[in-house]
Image (cartoon, grey):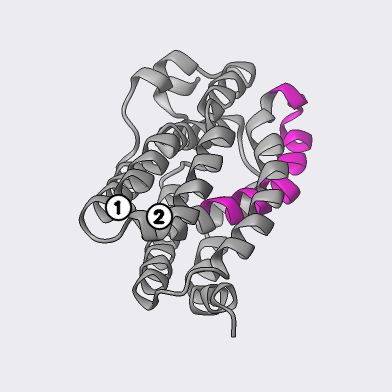
Amino acid sequence: MSFFERLERETAVERGALYAVPQILAGLSGEITREAYVAYLGEAYHHVSHTVPLLKAARDRMDAAHERFRAALDEYVEEETGHEKWILNDIRNAGGDADAVRDGPPGAATELMVAFAYDYVARVNPMGLFGMIYVLEGTSIALASHGAAAVARGLGLGPECFSYLTSHGALDQDHMKFFAGLMETVDDPLDQDAIVHVAKRVFGLFADVFRSIPLEARLAHAV
């Protein structure tokens, strides 16, 4: 069994729990309010804005024996830079207050997920960040390929409100192929265990992020 196959197998329960969250099911079927969509974008902004800093932090903590992974993180940095701006534009175009989102705090679940990633990179093993990459990119593919069109139809919103989901989803399909190949080169059992551990934890934490999004209630700064 390849390591990527092991990663998929050992995180199957947590992945299934994430995809069973009511907010995700509602989004995939297009049965959410505009307020819920904007609330999702707000939380997405608050974790995506940490993507590049986390990638750089992990890269800088890796030693010379992990050079190929450092190089891969440099590629991720180049491709992920500025994606949080796409989200702010989508918020504006969907009728939300992008400035309030940018200047405001994340929800508790989002804050905990981001804090966990920083802590693991700094305190345990920077290779673990690839577990978070696996979760976020796989989820964005699912949301982009099935959810964006359904939400657009349900809410009557144009493509200018979905640049993050549609563009990021297309990018991540290529990223996931690259990621799977990269994972085949992870031969240190400690690194493998770190990636699996972080993926399992982030699946759970990301599920909590989605659970925190109100399906009906209006978000105060997003109306």
> What residue is shown at x 64% (from left), y 47% (from top)?
27
> Which residue lies most toward the bottom here?
1
Tell me where residue 189 appears, x and y as whole percent.
38, 78
| Residue 28 vertical placement versus 35 (above, below) | below
Percent position of residue 102, x then y: 41, 20
144 in magenta: yes
Q: Would you say 103 lies left or right of 43 here?
A: left
Q: Amino acid at mark 2?
A: Leu
Q: Earlier in the sequence, mark 2 or mark 1?
A: 1
* Mark 2 Cα shell of 10 Å, populated few (<14), some (14-19), many (≥20): many
Q: Nearer the viewer, residue 210 or 60?
A: 60
Q: Would residue 215 appear left or right of 170 to someone viewing this image?
A: left
Vertical arrangement, residue 220 with respect to residue 77, above or below? above
Q: Which residue is mark 1?
A: 121
Left-right relation of 157 to 79:
right
Image marks 2 and 1: residues in contact by CB distance under 8 Å: yes
Segment colored magenta: 136-160
Residue at mark 2: 129
Q: Main secondary structure of the magenta part?
A: helix
The local secondary structure at tag 1 comes to helix
Q: Secondary structure at mark 2?
A: helix
